[in-house]
Image (cartoon, rainbow, N blue to C red):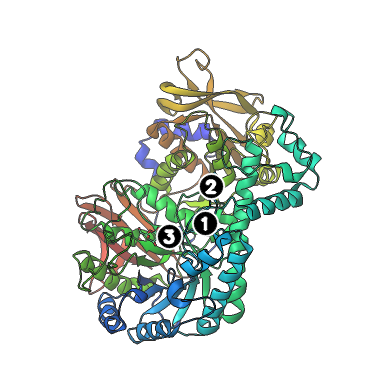
Amino acid sequence: MSTLSEVIDYMQHHDRLQFFFTATLSVLLSLGGSHPAAAQATAYSDKPPVLLGAAWYPEQWPESQWDADLSRMEAAHIHLVRVGEFAWSTMEPSEGKYNFTWLDHAIELAGKHHICVVLGTPTAAPPAWMTTKYPDTLRVDENGVRDEHGNRQQFSFASVRYRKFAHEIAEKMAERYGHNPNVVGWQLDNEYASPSFDPEAKAQFHEWLKAKYGTIENLNSHWATAYWSQTYDNFDEIPVRDKGENPALLLAWKRFVSDTWKSYSENQISAIRPQADKRQFITTNTMGWFDGFDEYTVHSVLDIAAWDDYISTDTYDYFDNGARHDLTRGYKNKNFWVMETEPAFVNWRRVNTPLEKGQVRDMAWQAIGHGSDAVEYWQWRSALNGQEEYHGVLVGADGTPVPVYDEVKQTGEEFEKAGKALESTSPRSSVAIIHDYNSRWAIDFQRHNIEFDPVAELVAFYKPLRTQAQAVDIISPNAPLDSYKLVVAPALNVLPQEVADRLIAYVKQGGNLLLGPRSGMKDEYNALNVERQPGPLVDLLGGRVEQFYAIDKEVPVSGDLGSGTADVWAETLSTKSTDTHVLMKYGASNGWLDNQPAVITRKVGNGSITYIGAWLNDDLLAKLTAALLQQSGVQPIIPNTPDGVEVCLRTGANRSVLILINHNKAEARVDLPHAMRDLLASDNTSRTSVDLPGYGVAVLEGK
Ligand code: GAL
C-alpha cells in the first residue's frame, strides 16, 4: 500500500484497530528507517549509568551539617549533586580574593558518600562588590533602564568586562577541579534568559549586521526598508528593539541574541576546556519551550543538552512534558540530562498545587523513557531565607525528610535496579517533527490570530503522532532527515531555500513530508515569499495557498478520512498538478472558505508531500496522522495500549528496555508482544502482560 488514497480506502474498509497490527519488539529492534543509535549522554565506568541527583547548596549551611545531608542523600540512592551555580560571593568574596576551601571539602565529602558532582559556574549571580564597582556589567532592559544589584541574572550578556570576570572565575574553578575524579561535568551559568539592550550590546548588534549583510544596501533590500521610510544610510542608525519593529529587524535581533549567548558560552568554555579532563562534559540548563534565543545555535558549542523540567501547565500534561524531553534530546540528537525537576511543587505558579502522590516517580521515569540519563531534584533542602522558602524540597530546613523523600528514594532504588540494562540505550524514532525558532519568532511577531500559538500548534501534531507511533524525534530544520519515514513540519513559516532543498531531496528519495498551516510563507530574512505558501515547495506540492484567514468560529472540514472542524486558522488551497489530490475541503462558513480545499497531497516517486492549510480539531488530525503513518510504514511499539499509558523504548546494541508509564489515576493493563523480564521486580520475573496501578511504572527488558 503506498498512496494516501489507497491507505484511506483500506482504512474505510477495515476496522481501524487492524491498522495497529501486532508489532513485535524484535521487529522494532531492526527498524529499517529509525534514527541511528544516539549515544548515551554521559558514561562513567565508575558511576551509575542512570543518575538520581539533587541541587545542593553547601555554602548556605555550616560544614558540620553536610555529612548528615549527604548521608540522607546516599540513603535515597542519590549519586549526584549540582553545586556552586549561585555561589560567586562565597567563591570570590572580594575582587581577586578567592576561597575554594569550602568547595574542596564539599566535593570530597560528597565523594565519600558515592555522590559525584556537577559544578555550576556562578555567573547567574554576580556579587555586589562587582556590580557596585562596575555598573556597566549590569543589564539594561528594552526600555533603556539599567538593573540594580539584587535578585539574580542582573548581568549584561554582552559586557566585555562581565565576560572577563566570568572567564576568570570559570578558569579558577577549572584549574582546581578540572581533574577532580569526582567532578563529572560543568553547568555554565543558570538558565540563560534575558538579553541586554545596553550600548555595548547595541554596537555589537551593528557589527553583527555588518558581517551578515556586508553592505547597508543589501540590508535595505532584504528588509524592504522603503516601507515607512525605514531606509538606512549606515548600520549605526539601526535601532535595537524586540517588539513593534520591522519583522526582519526583529528576527535579526533574535539571531544576534542567539549568537551572543553562544559566544557567552564559548567565553567560559575557553576557560574550562583546556583545564578539564575530557570525561567532564560542559552543558547549561535550558527551559523547554523558552524561545528567547535559538538553542540549536547555543548547543553547537556544548557537549550535552540538559533542561529544567517543571510542568508548564497547572497540572501535569504528559504530552507537553514528553514533547519537551524530545525537544531537548534534539538539541544534540542524543541522550540528555534533566538538570532540575520539581519535588512535588514549586513556588512560582499562581497556585502552587503539588503533583499527586506517585506523579513525581512517574515524571522521573518519563524523563528516562524519553532519553534522559539523569534526573535531579531542585532542591535538596529548604534555604533558611531567600526568594524560594516555599519551594518543594526533599528535606526541610531542619535536614529531615519531607513526605516526597520516600517516593524519590523508591525511584532511586529503581534507577539502580534498571540502570545496567539502560546503559548505552536511547530512544529511536522513524518520525520527526521539525521545530524551528525562526518560524516561531516570525509567527509570534505577527500572529494574525492571537490564538495561534506555535508551540500549542506543534503539540497538537505531537499528540497523535506520539500516541500512534509511540516515538517521535523533535529536530532542528538543519538536522539530517534520511533516517525518518515521516517528517512533519507543523508551521515552518520561515523556509530558507537551503532547508527547502533538503526537504525536496528527502521527498524525492522516498520520504513522506507533512506540512502544517503557515509553512513556507517567509524567506530567511522574514520577507514574504512571492510564490505564496509553501514558497519554494509549491512546485513539489503541485499546489499552493490562495489565501489565509484568521478564524474565530469552528469551520466544518471533511473528506474521505472523515469529518471534523478547523479553528483559529484556515487557508484555501489550490492544485495545479493533475496528480495533486484534494484530501479535505471546508464546508459552508464565511463564503471565502466554502467548498475550498483544506488539505492536499501528492505522491512523488516513493515519497509524498501533504499540506494541511488549517488547524484541524484533534480527532480529524489524528485520522490524518494515522493514515500518513500507515502510508509511511510506521508501526506502534505496543499496539492497543490503554489511553493514558505511555510507551517508551530505549534501544542499545543488542537489547531494548521498555518503559511503561500509567499516567492515569486508575489502574491499567498492558499486553506485551512476548515475554519480557520485569527489571523492577525483585526476582526479575518474566511477564507477558503488566498490571499498572495508578501512576504505576514498569520497566521491562526484551531479548
Ligand atoms: C529554576 C532555577 C532554580 C530554581 C528553580 C525553582 O528555574 O534554575 O535556581 O529557582 O527554578 O523552581
Q: Position of residue 87 (x, y in %)?
A: 43, 72
Please, what secondary structure does the residue beneath circle 2 have? loop
Q: Dots 3 and 2: beta carbons under 8 Å?
A: no
Q: Residue at x 52, y 39 (%)?
A: 490
For disc 2, the neighbor class at 10 Å (few under 14, some 14 to 19, many from 20) is many
Dot 3 or dot 2: first in sequence order is 3
Instruction: Name the residue type under label 2.
Output: His
Could you say where residue 409 lies in the image, as x and y percent from the top left?
Answer: 25, 71
Mark 1 residue element: helix
**Comes first in the chain, label 1 or label 2:** 1
Q: Are marks 1 and 2 in contact (CB under 8 Å)?
A: yes
Residue position marked by numbered label 1 in the rendering: 330
Q: Which residue is mark 2?
A: 435
Residue located farthest toward the front when viewing the structure as drawn: 133
Q: Is residue 348 visible?
A: yes
Q: Quadrant of residue 367?
A: bottom left
Compare residues 430 and 139 and report the one nearer the observer: 139
- Tell me the tag on residue 470: none
Q: Amino acid at mark 3?
A: Gly
Q: Is residue 363 left or right of residue 101?
A: left
Look at mark 3 in the image and give the residue it sits on: 150
**In whole angstroms, how far apart are the C-alphas of marks 3 and 2?**
36 Å
Distance from Cα at disc 1 to Cα at disc 2: 9 Å
Quadrant showing the C terminus? bottom left
Number of on-image labels: 3
Relative to 190, is 273 above or below? below
- Under mark 1, the amino acid is Gly
